[in-house]
Image: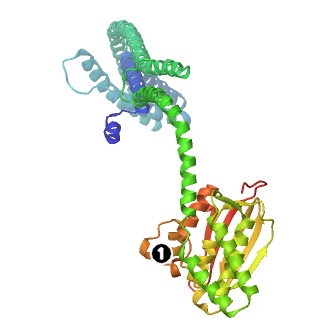
Amino acid sequence: MKNKLSQKMIPLRLKLSGIFIMASILIFVVNVMLMLGINNMSVKMDRVYRDNLALNELSGALDDVQNNMTEYLFTKTTDSLEDYYKSAQNYKDLYQTLNGKVTGDKYDMMERNIRNMSEQYLILTDNAIEAKRKRNVEEYSMEYDKATEIRNFIDTYINSLNNERFKNNSIFFSMLIADFRVFEIVSMIVMFIALVGSAIFVIAFTSSVTKPVNNLAVAADEVAKGNFEIETLPISSNDELGVVTGAFNKMVVSIRQYIEQIKNNMENERRLKENELKMETSLKDAQLKYLQAQINPHFLFNTLNAGAQLAMMEDAEKTYNYIQNTAAFFRYNVREGNTTVTLDDEINLIDHYIYILNVRFSGDIKYEKNIETKTKNVPMPSMVLQPIVENSINHGIKEMEGKGKIILHVYEKDDDVYVSIKDNGSGMTQEMIDKVLSEKLKEEEKPAPAGAHGIGMDNVIKRIRLFTEREDSINILSEGEDMGTEVIIRLKKSETVNV
């Protein structure tokens, strides 16, 4: 849909650029046409008197030739001779531009006569100059007289042709002046129409842009004031403004639907909120009690049996201590109504538990405690540490034949209390750790506890996370197989614990 929209949509930038370019091209074309017209009129007006100017220049060049020849004949100076040759060449260049063909036009005939007489005139002047240089007075006098006579004829023809052309050009010039006035008026009208048309075109386009923007601004102001019952805006363009207007319409409709949905849900939410809180509390209590209730009854049988054997082999004092520890252990587990205990209670339970196991296994389990903080007021769920110790023994150090070791370390860090239970047993792979912590361990992957004792790690993880409401409240560390395992529990300190 987005591709179709982008194919159909004409960007506003392109429209604005197009309008500017079209208006500029229109004014440019009109100006070019006016400039071409003015230039054409100028060329015509210049051409009117070009012939008269050429004839006047030709007449002046003829006078220069005559004067320079006369000066040389009477003075015979080098400068005057040089001036003669220059003026004669200039005059020759000018008269050769005249028409030399035979036509029926009287102006062309007069030009042709002037050209022929000019050729004859220059021959006579050259002869007079050569005769003077040879000191032939009679000859240069005769040639001078002939040249002067022809010069007078040429000058008469030039004046006649100039007058005729001036009369004819004057009429044409008047016509050009009238045409120029008309062109001037037409040019002003065309320029005015072009400017007005461009202005109308630009104003109409900008109105088509600003009107939707104004409508959108008014509607947005109404929505900002909380009025969501406004009518949807019409989409009149296929550019960015159209896209924005369509998005605004959808937003208003969505807000209406959302508000209606909120109104419909508010009553139900109020009714369900109290029940939901009660259900959540009941669920947590049920989960804690259910998970805590998973104590293996076979352990009682085994420990009592070991106590009976011990009573047969040893004196009453050791039997008494053993039975006392066993009684304390089970008394802790079977008491009802206490799902929250202190860390101190859990540590005492481990002491009883380790004592009982060392009686059963002849002291093969080495146990160390390192308590760096007060534990009496630290709350936690019951039966959490003992299953971890049990798991370390059954799946970590049980087969180590007296070399197994359990280290309990309690310390503070920031505002939390950390409980570390570490063994030097078989260890765990990182893949297994990730599965245990994510509670995704399959049933066939879970190691069966020896003698079916204890609560599984998944049980402990669920209860500690439910109690602390934090996913990072328990962590498992191991460098790999046969490298031991460390379970770290993170607890909050508290001044009061209900037990």
Disc tally is 1
**Residue 359 occupies which quadrant of the picture?**
bottom right
Rendered residue at 53%/45% (across/down): 279
Say above or below: 368 vs 435.
below
Which quarter of the rendering shows the N terminus?
top left
The answer to whether residue 478 is seen in the rendering is no
Closest to the observer, 14 or 168: 14
Q: Position of residue 84 (x, y in %)?
A: 47, 32
Q: Position of residue 134 (x, y in %)?
A: 45, 38
Q: Position of residue 66 (x, y in %)?
A: 45, 24
The answer to whether residue 186 is seen in the rendering is yes
Closest to the observer, 36 or 263: 263
Residue that carries the numbered disc 1 in the rendered image: 446
Left or right of 495 in this view: 259:
left
Left or right of 39 in this view: 423:
right
Say above or below: 399 vs 472.
below
Neighbour class for label 1 at 10 Å: few (<14), some, many (≥20)?
few
Rendered residue at 66%/89% (across/down): 310
- What element does badge 1 sit on? loop
| Colour option used | rainbow
* Residue type (three-letter) at the residue carrying disc 1: Lys
Which quarter of the rendering shows the C terminus?
bottom right
Q: Position of residue 82 (x, y in %)?
A: 51, 36
**Residue 181 occupies which quadrant of the picture?**
top left
Rendered residue at 39%/7% (across/down): 185
Say above or below: 169 vs 367.
above
Closest to the observer, 102 or 476: 476
Closest to the observer, 1 or 157: 1
Left or right of 273 in this view: 55:
left
